[in-house]
Image: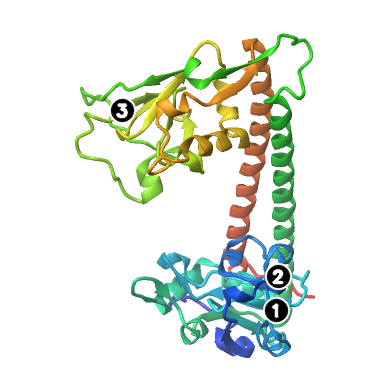
């Protein structure tokens, strides 16, 4: 809380621990021998989801006394106690309305809001603001990990309007959350539909009208060509890497700093439309086609290849995203010291594909259209989230006041 911040009329600043009806407490020890049956257990990883999904929690066998002591009920706020990154400390989530009896892990702290003083959802939203995050970082301690204890957590200063105004603010922000949740659900549905399309179209189970030529099984080495041109004249300065979640990225986007060698002359050149992968990480999906840049250079360890005239590049891009490709990669890596997959090993993998290159393109076009629709929905989702952030900044600081009947 900034010292010079003006407190809105009728609002107060209170400590977080004063808003808890049962103090702040740690959760139950997660005994590995008792996992697998019993009541749902909320773990640290569950707090990082947009919403705690009670139906997908692991189970822990607990006594009735333990359940009473460590139960997490609707409206409870749960916070992580430690983080590898300072900005990730005190990750907060709220126990949802849909709630069977459940407990929370010992690496989590619980606050049960006193509903005579604060609306739980208002407090949850406030604890996720930039203002609260900055305070949590200041209240934490850093050694090998960043940690925050019950005392530190309780010292968070909360800007608190009257209860009726809290309810109004919570209702407004809750409406945005509902819209975000519905759009997120739609995106997941679209992803499942695309996955089904891939399963049918990329295996030939469903043929497109007008195509009758047979499919054939070939080795990737017959249709792909390795590339190993070096950046000897140092004409290319853009260093890239390939991740399993975002494809081609600049190293500083992945590591927050450049990790490239000062001498780029031995780095491999990759051009737009060519594929590349890290041989030691292909088994976790670190492969992609370069689409966002005209060119770049990759560490000498990378494998770069392009498609020949017997396989459509778009078709190949979609096929490497299938479970079939991932399974074949993992199988091909078995037995190697570090489970690496060089181009020679990749070349032995077999693919069944249409003989007609036009059928390959038609299949790829359908899947690309599905991707474009998902991308558009994701952009709308990000826009909604940004709009909500702006609204939180206005409402939770009193910059914009709501009318209370």
| Nearest-to-viewer mark from 2 and 3 | 3
Compared across the picture, whether 124 is left or right of 115 comes to left
CB-based contact (under 8 Å), mark 2 and mark 1: yes
Nearest the eye: 155 or 368: 368
Reply above or below: 88 against 118.
above
Q: Secondary structure at mark 2?
A: helix
Q: Quadrant of residue 327?
A: top right
Q: Position of residue 8 (x, y in %)?
A: 58, 77
Q: Earlier in the sequence, mark 2 or mark 1?
A: 1
> Label 3: few (<14), some or many (≥20) within 10 Å?
many
Quadrant for residue 305, please give it. top left
- Tell me residue 284's x, y (percent): 50, 43
| Rendering coords of residue 345 (x, y %) | 44, 29
Residue at x 46%, y 28% (from the top left corner): 346
Q: CA distance from mark 1 to mark 3?
A: 57 Å
Q: Quadrant of the C terminus?
A: bottom right
Residue plotted at (70% across, 86% down): 63
Per the image, the residue denoted by label 2 is 170
The Cα–Cα distance between marks 2 and 3, rounded to whole angstroms, is: 53 Å
- Callout 1 crowding tier (Cα within 10 Å): few <14, some 14–19, many ≥20: many
Disc number placed over residue 268 in the picture, else none: 3
* Between discs 1 and 3, the one toward the N terminus: 1
Of residue 333 and residue 75, the one placed in the foreground of this image is 333
Residue nearest the observer in this picture, 386 or 233: 233
Q: Judging from the image, what secondary structure is the residue with disc 1 in?
A: loop
Residue 136 vs residue 162, the one in the foreground: 136
Q: Position of residue 319 (x, y in %)?
A: 59, 28
- Label 1: which residue? 119
How many other residues sit within 10 Å of disc 2, few (<14), some (14-19) or many (≥20)?
A: many
Q: Quick one: label 2 or label 3, which is nearer the N terminus?
A: 2
Discs 1/3, front: 3
Q: Name the secondary structure under disc 3.
A: strand
């Amino acid at each position: 809380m900034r010292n010079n911040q003006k407190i809105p009329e009728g609002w107060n600043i209170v400590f977080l621990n004063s808003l808890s009806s049962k103090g702040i407490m740690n959760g139950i020890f997660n005994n590995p021998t008792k996992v697998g049956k019993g009541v749902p257990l909320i773990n640290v990883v569950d707090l990082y989801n947009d919403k705690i999904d009670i139906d997908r929690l692991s189970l822990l066998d607990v006594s009735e006394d333990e359940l009473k002591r460590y139960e997490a009920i609707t409206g409870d706020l749960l916070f992580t106690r430690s983080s590898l990154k300072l900005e990730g400390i005190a990750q907060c989530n709220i126990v949802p309305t849909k709630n069977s009896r459940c407990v929370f892990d010992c690496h989590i702290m619980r606050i049960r809001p006193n509903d005579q003083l604060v609306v739980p959802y208002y407090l949850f939203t406030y604890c996720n603001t930039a203002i609260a995050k900055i305070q949590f970082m200041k209240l934490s301690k850093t050694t090998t990990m960043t940690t925050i204890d019950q005392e530190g957590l309780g010292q968070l200063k909360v800007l608190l309007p009257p209860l009726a105004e809290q309810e109004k603010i919570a209702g407004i922000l809750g409406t945005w959350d509902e819209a975000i949740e519905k759009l997120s659900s739609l995106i997941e549905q679209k992803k499942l539909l695309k996955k089904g399309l891939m399963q049918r179209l990329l295996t030939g189970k469903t043929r497109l009208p007008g195509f009758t030529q047979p499919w054939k099984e070939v080795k990737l080495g017959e249709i792909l060509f390795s590339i190993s041109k070096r950046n000897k004249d140092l004409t290319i300065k853009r260093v890239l890497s390939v991740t399993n979640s975002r494809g081609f990225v600049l190293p500083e986007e992945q590591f927050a700093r450049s990790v490239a060698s000062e001498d780029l002359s031995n780095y491999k050149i990759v051009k737009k439309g060519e594929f590349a992968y890290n041989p030691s990480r292909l088994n976790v999906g670190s492969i992609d086609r370069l689409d966002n840049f005209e060119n770049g250079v990759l560490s000498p360890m990378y494998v770069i290849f392009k498609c020949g005239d017997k396989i459509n590049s778009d078709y190949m891009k979609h096929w490497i995203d299938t479970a079939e490709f991932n399974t074949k990669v993992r199988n091909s890596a078995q037995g190697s010291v570090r489970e690496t997959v060089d181009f020679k090993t990749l070349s032995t993998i077999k693919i069944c594909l249409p003989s007609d290159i036009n059928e390959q393109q038609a299949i790829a076009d359908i899947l690309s259209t599905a991707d474009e629709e998902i991308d558009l929905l994701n952009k709308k989702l990000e826009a909604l989230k940004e709009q909500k952030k702006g609204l939180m900044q206005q409402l939770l600081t009193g910059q914009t006041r709501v009318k209370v009947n």
